[in-house]
């Protein structure tokens, strides 16, 4: 049984309104955030605050991203129904659920086993049939490549070249790149001739992308 009270639904509507006020325009993104029960992706200790626009700890030193960050990345992806989207950094599964609710095929990779184990069970339980993988996202998921879109949800020290190889021509990668103390949100579009076009979209805060070996 999915617990989604009137109070939680009301709080969720308020969050959607707040995101609109903060500049999110894409109706598909706002609709998806209005549908996905964020309180079920958090430790129950934080349930009361689940619809505040802030990140929360999810264990293993990681966080569920702030809703404004999830909305911004989802908007920048410019997805269309049926597209294949690769996410690096499954974490709580909330971003994957939002994308799934937008009608795309989601492939998501998590580097920390504890989070992979938890989230790969939670997502199908809530009806989000995203394909979950345990591994190093820097390597992508070659088996299902190429992807229409790639989203990275941890601060990347560099743009992983191997991931760009898994992006279709005309595809878009949304990646927060660490520059000093903050992450600059970038979109990288892969052009016909194989070159890329990069654009900046403001600064955000992310946990760092992990590069060491699997545990
Ligand atoms: N999208 C998540 C955000 C989680 S925070 C959500 O909606 O909750 C970033 C996540 O990226 C963490 O779970 C972290 O363990 C994971 N991560 C960090 N480096 C990674 C890597 N190299 N490959 C895959 N996942 C990684």
Image (tube, rainbow, N blue to C red):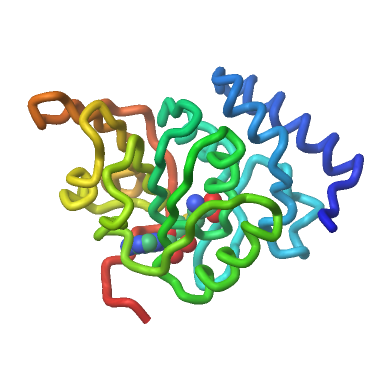
- Is 108 left, or right, of 103 in this rendering? left
Quadrant in the rendering for residue 188: top left
| Screen quadrant of the C terminus | bottom left
Left or right of 14 on screen, residue 102: left
Q: Residue 185 sits in which quadrant?
A: top left
Task: Say whether residue 133 is left or right of residue 34.
Answer: left
Residue 169: x and y in percent read 21, 30
Where the N terminus falls, by quadrant?
Answer: bottom right
Pick the residue in front: 103 or 110: 103
- Residue at the bottom extreme of this rendering: 215
The answer to whether any part of residue 191 appears in the image is: yes
Percent x, y of residue 164: 20, 43
Q: Can residue 65 be seen by looking at this rendering?
A: no
Question: In the displayed structure, would residue 73 be above or below residue 45?
Answer: above
Name the residue located 26 percent from the left edge and 58 percent from the top edge: 138
Q: Residue at x 71, y 24 (%)?
A: 17
**Residue drawn where x is 28% and y is 76% of the image:** 213
When the figure is inspected, residue 100 is found, relative to residue 131, above or below; the finding is above
Residue that extends furthest to the right in the rendered view of this protein = 6
Residue positioned 25% across, 26% down in the render: 170
Look at the picture and state if 145 lies above or below 192. Answer: below
């Amino acid at each position: 049984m999915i617990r989604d009270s009137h109070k939680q639904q009301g709080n969720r509507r308020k969050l959607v309104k707040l995101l609109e006020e903060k500049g999110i325009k894409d109706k598909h993104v706002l609709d998806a955030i209005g549908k996905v029960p964020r309180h079920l992706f958090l430790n129950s200790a934080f349930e009361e605050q689940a619809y505040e626009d802030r990140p929360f700890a999810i264990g293993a030193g990681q966080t569920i991203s702030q809703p404004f960050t999830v909305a911004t990345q989802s908007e920048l992806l410019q997805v269309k129904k049926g597209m294949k989207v690769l996410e690096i950094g499954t974490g709580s599964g909330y971003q994957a659920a939002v994308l799934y609710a937008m009608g795309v095929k989601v492939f998501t990779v998590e580097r920390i086993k504890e989070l992979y184990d938890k989230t790969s069970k939670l997502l199908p339980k809530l009806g989000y049939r995203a394909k979950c993988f345990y591994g190093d996202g820097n390597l992508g998921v070659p088996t299902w490549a190429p992807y229409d879109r790639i989203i990275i949800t941890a601060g990347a020290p560099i743009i992983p070249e191997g991931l760009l190889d898994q992006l279709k021509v005309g595809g878009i990668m949304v990646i927060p790149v660490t520059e000093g103390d903050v992450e600059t949100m970038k979109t990288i579009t892969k052009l016909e001739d194989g070159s890329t076009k990069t654009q900046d979209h403001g600064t955000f805060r992310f946990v760092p992308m992990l590069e060491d070996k699997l545990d």
